[in-house]
Image (cartoon, helix red, strand yellow):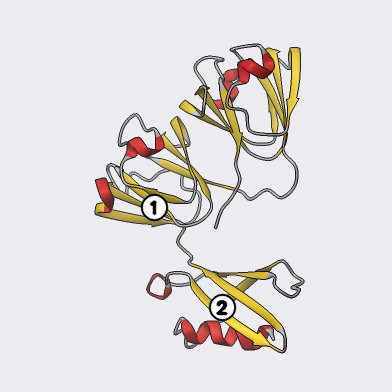
């Protein structure tokens, strides 16, 4: 079954001599379930839009979704005009590819964009979708100099917030998105935190607005550890991937 479908995929993508590296998830497929195939290592001229191939065997239907290699596209001008650069992995210095970024398309996954090289400066969280203007990702300018692809997380999310530095003072553990931290924690400022599971985005203002900060599993003993200039965290949310 898998060999015949991989051959079908190769034919549809017009790949003649190249062997496709195919990653499947989940491993076991039952009736009415969806099997995802990620085609990797394709040359730029072989990249296509998502292709859906339906394979019918007996009474079971399998749906194969081909995700293109490219995952985010940066554009120099608004509304996806001007020069563009396609990126599919972390990049600590984008200056040689474009001088400004006024719009972007996220084809799959979740990304953090950074104002300066080396993953520094203002941070911006982007998930699947189109962003015709940098203000759509709450950008402060058209400067994007580095980017990070946030890993996928399967399982529960847990984060502990602390009132004081070095994981001291009053503590609260949360597992869900929180649009108003003060309503749950009764503090406007978070001076340290411990991310136990999952990836999260902090926001300086309520309802996921204002400056953004990406936190991954680990201990953050002071607000500067997550790149903030002050301890104000008024909302936060989980990073949940989409494809």
Neighbor class of circle 1 (other Cα within 10 Å; few <14, some 14-19, many 20+) is: some
Quadrant assignment, res 55: bottom right
Given residues 200 and 192, the one toward you in this image is: 200
- In the image, residue 22 sits, relative to residue 202, either above or below, namely below
Please tell me which of labels 1 and 2 falls first in the chain.
Answer: 2
Q: Quadrant of residue 4?
A: bottom right
Q: Work out whether residue 4 can be spotted.
A: yes
Task: List the residue tagged with mark 2.
Answer: 20
- Residue 42, placed above or below residue 206: below
Residue at image mark 1: 105
Q: Which quadrant is the C terminus positioned in? A: bottom right
In the picture shown, does residue 197 fall above or below 12? above
Q: Which residue is drawn at 46% across and 47% down?
A: 91
Q: How far apart are marks 1 and 2 (CA)?
A: 25 Å
x then y, percent, for residue 142: 30, 36
**Residue sitting at x 54%, y 82%:** 9
Q: Which mark is residue 83?
A: none
Front-most of 43 and 48? 48
- SS at circle 1: strand
Left or right, 210 with respect to 36, comes to: left
| Residue at 76 percent of width and 73 percent of height | 30
Q: Cβ–Cβ below 8 Å for labels 1 and 2?
A: no
Give the structural element (helix, strand or loop) at label 2: loop
Up/down of 47 relative to 158, above or below: below
Residue 77, can we see it? no
Number of numbered discs on residues: 2
Tell me residue 65's x, y (percent). Answer: 56, 71
Q: For mark 2, does the 10 Å Cα neighbourhood hold few (<14), some (14 to 19), or many (20 or more) residues?
A: some
* Image quarter of the N terminus: bottom right
């Amino acid at each position: 079954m898998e060999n015949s479908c991989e051959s079908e995929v190769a034919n549809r993508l017009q790949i003649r001599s190249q062997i496709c590296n195919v990653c499947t998830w989940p491993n076991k497929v039952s009736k009415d379930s969806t099997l995802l195939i990620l085609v990797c290592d394709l040359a730029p001229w072989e990249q296509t839009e998502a292709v859906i191939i339906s394979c019918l065997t007996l009474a079971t239907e399998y749906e194969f979704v081909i995700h293109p290699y490219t995952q985010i596209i940066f554009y120099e001008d608004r509304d996806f005009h001007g020069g563009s650069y396609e990126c599919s992995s972390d990049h600590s210095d984008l200056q040689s590819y474009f001088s400004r970024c006024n719009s972007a398309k996220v084809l799959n996954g979740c990304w953090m964009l950074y104002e300066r090289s080396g993953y520094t400066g203002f941070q911006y969280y982007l998930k699947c979708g189109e962003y015709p203007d940098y203000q759509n990702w709450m950008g402060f300018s058209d400067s994007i100099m580095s980017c990070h692809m946030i890993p996928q997380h399967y399982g529960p999310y847990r984060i502990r917030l602390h009132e004081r530095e070095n994981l001291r003072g009053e503590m609260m553990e949360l597992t869900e998105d929180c649009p108003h931290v003060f309503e749950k924690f009764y503090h406007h400022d978070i001076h340290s935190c411990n991310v136990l599971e999952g990836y999260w985005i902090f926001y300086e203002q309520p309802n996921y607005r204002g400056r953004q900060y990406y936190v991954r599993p680990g201990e953050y003993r002071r607000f500067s550890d997550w790149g903030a200039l002050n301890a104000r965290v008024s909302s936060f949310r989980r990073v949940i991937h989409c494809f």
